[in-house]
Amino acid sequence: MQVIEEASLPERPRVLVIDGLLMTAEAVVMALGPLAFAGHLVIPVTGDHLREAVSWCPEMALLDVDSVAGATCLECVDILHGANIPFVVMGGDLDRPLLGKCIHAGASAVVDKSSPLSDLFGVIARQLAGEVLLREDLRQRLIESYDRETQARLAPFEVLTRREKFILSELTEGRAAESIARRASVSISTVRSQIKAILQKLGVNSQLAATALVQQAGWTLSDDTTGSDASDHASFIARDPSQTSS
């Protein structure tokens, strides 16, 4: 791990720079010094390294969504949100659904990377001053883009019945058909029939492919069954009227 930090007085506002490109991150950190900010970055960008950097207690963070892989980027967003660190995202494509996800998660502004550095530093100053940074029309456009992408990503799972969703969730947790049958107090043939139906509806050939699709889409079991216990699951598996017996 490489850490670069501007020498600064303790009272200087601390800005955490999260950027997968070392040259860009170094340039931002170096430019922050003369502007009375303390810059700090961690290379490479990983969840563990960001958690270490959070201990530096920054007043805010900059996150470049173009240079950080999608899954890592979302992990960074979760870490910053959990640590109550305000953050601004930078990107070259303001229509990317990932930016909308960041806004949903609490990002206070989006900076177009085609803008001059002076614009970025202005956003930093305004963020630290507690100003509202994101225009409402841009905020709505980003959120709508995120919503459209989310709907498209989760659409394949909408065709599943309630019991099929439960069984798919169990498979994703690594449970075999025999274990699912025991937990739900139903026959193994019932579970296997449902697994076959799930694979057909999702257009995949194996349970491994189905769970990979779940992980790629970020799908989770809907709230209407998450809180149920094993007996509840057994009840709806046995009596779900939305699907005829296989």
Image (cartoon, grey):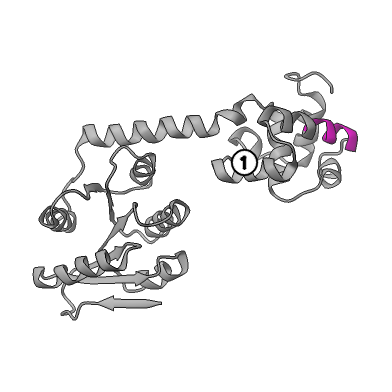
Q: At x 73% / y 33%, what residue is drawn?
A: 199
Residue 54 x %, y %: 36, 69
Question: Magenta stretch containing residue 170, yes or no?
Answer: no
Q: Tell me: 164 left or right of 190.
A: left
Q: Tell me: 183 left or right of 166.
A: right
Q: Nearer the viewer, residue 232 or 87?
A: 87
Quadrant into which the N terminus falls: bottom left
Quadrant into which the C terminus falls: top right
Q: Tell me: 138 left or right of 187.
A: left
Q: What stretch of residues is rendered in magenta?
A: 188-194
Q: At x 66% / y 35%, what residue is drawn?
A: 225
Q: How many marks?
A: 1
Residue 43 x %, y %: 37, 71
Q: Secondary structure at mark 1?
A: helix
Residue 150 x %, y %: 47, 34
Q: Which residue is mark 1?
A: 213
Q: At x 31% / y 57%, what residue is drawn?
A: 63
Q: Nearer the viewer, residue 83 or 97?
A: 97
Residue 187 visible in rendering: no
Task: Answer above or below: position of 243 versus 139.
Answer: above
Residue 65 x %, y %: 34, 52
Question: Magenta stretch containing residue 193, yes or no?
Answer: yes
Q: Quadrant of residue 182?
A: top right
Q: Nearer the viewer, residue 26 or 133?
A: 26
Rate crowding at label 1 as few (under 14), some (14 to 19) or many (20 or more) other CA atoms within 10 Å: some
Q: At x 27% / y 46%, what residue is drawn?
A: 92
Q: Main secondary structure of the magenta part?
A: helix
Q: Quadrant of residue 98?
A: top left
Task: Answer above or below: position of 43 versus 82.
Answer: below
Q: Tell me: 19 left or right of 136.
A: right
Residue 27 visible in rendering: yes
